[in-house]
Image: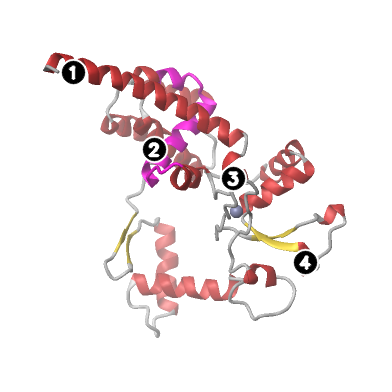
Amino acid sequence: MNNIELDLAVSQLVKTERKITRQILDLIVLAEKQRLPAERGFRNTHDWLIRGHGYSGSAANRRVQAARLLNVVPEVASKVEDGSLNLTTLWQTQKTINAQQAASGQKVTLEEKREALHSIENETSEGAERVLNALFPDGVQSGEKTTHKRDGGLRIFIEVTDEEAKEIQRSRELLSQSTTSSHGALYARLCKEYNDRKDPLRKAAAPGRGDVIRKANGACVFKDPVTGRVCGSRFNTQQDHIIPKAKGGSDEPENMRCLCRRHNQLMAEKEFGREFMENKRRRSDSGTRHRST
Ligand SMILES: [Zn+2]
């Protein structure tokens, strides 16, 4: 193969790759609509792409964020195919929009999303970052970083606001007698204090409530009946009534299990219907600050 042929072959494959990327994004949108990850026993969409399909964490993240943007701005799909937008610039956009919404407490409108995407067309990732930071100044990413130390510890670089810095300073003053000379020690000490108070796994072994979570070691027990995969997530786990209370289920331990929030919601949707649960969520969400996802 000479270099002209080689160049042509790569150029054709790149076109195919973009087409496939677009198809994968479409399928991720569909999978989220159909609750595929939760139903197959995954913790979330990222987990499905990582454990189920072998993507790396950052590759999965790019695709999930890009798919969510494509879901609300469908014209993105053809831009991915012609190469004027790509996974990286879409991920940057979605991430900045989420941060902007979280920081300002206001939703970025569909029109603003469209405009942002239009203005980063054909930009490099550096160019896109500049444009996005100018459009969404509240969403400028912090320099927060976590790296894993060789001895198993973490090195955490954090940023706080002026107000948060004052809270931290006050904690240091209150704890100055103990071993909180460094920020790391203070952070760990405060986390431990919080966990001792709130973690159901640590609370005195009183019978009844909390038992179910302790028995499951705080991990979600949802199991996909098809593959047998158990979720195992320890984030946001809650006690769930196997037969819902509204349908006469009891508070007895036999009727209780430990589920993560996502699987708790999935089971509730199966019991009461998706529309009913979505309306319920919408009602309890309205009036509260927008949650970034
Ligand atoms: Zn779960």
The mark that comes first in sequence, 4 or 2, is 2
Question: Dot 3 corresponds to which residue?
Answer: 40
SS of the residue at dot 4? helix
- Answer left or right for 152 relative to 52: left
Of badges 4 and 2, the one in the foreground is 4
Of badges 2 and 1, the one in the foreground is 1
Give amino acid for label 1.
Asp
SS of the residue at dot 1? helix
SS of the residue at dot 3? loop
Number of the label disc, if any, that sits on residue 254: 4
Give amino acid for label 4.
Glu
Question: Dot 2 corresponds to which residue?
Answer: 137
> Neighbour class for label 3 at 10 Å: few (<14), some, many (≥20)?
many
The mark that comes first in sequence, 1 or 3, is 1
Residue stretch rendered in magenta on the structure: 53-80
Q: In the image, is residue 98 above or below residue 249?
A: above
Q: In the image, is residue 199 above or below residue 2?
A: below
* Cα distance in 3D space between marks 1 and 4: 65 Å
Q: Quadrant of the N terminus?
A: top left
Number of the label disc, if any, that sits on residue 7: 1
Residue at the image position 39 percent from the left and 57 percent from the top? 160
Give amino acid for label 3.
Arg
Residue 117: % across, % down: 41, 24
The mark that comes first in sequence, 4 or 3, is 3
Q: Decide which of 171, 245 is in the foreground and name it.
A: 245
Residue at the image position 62 percent from the left and 44 percent from the top? 39
The mark that comes first in sequence, 1 or 4, is 1
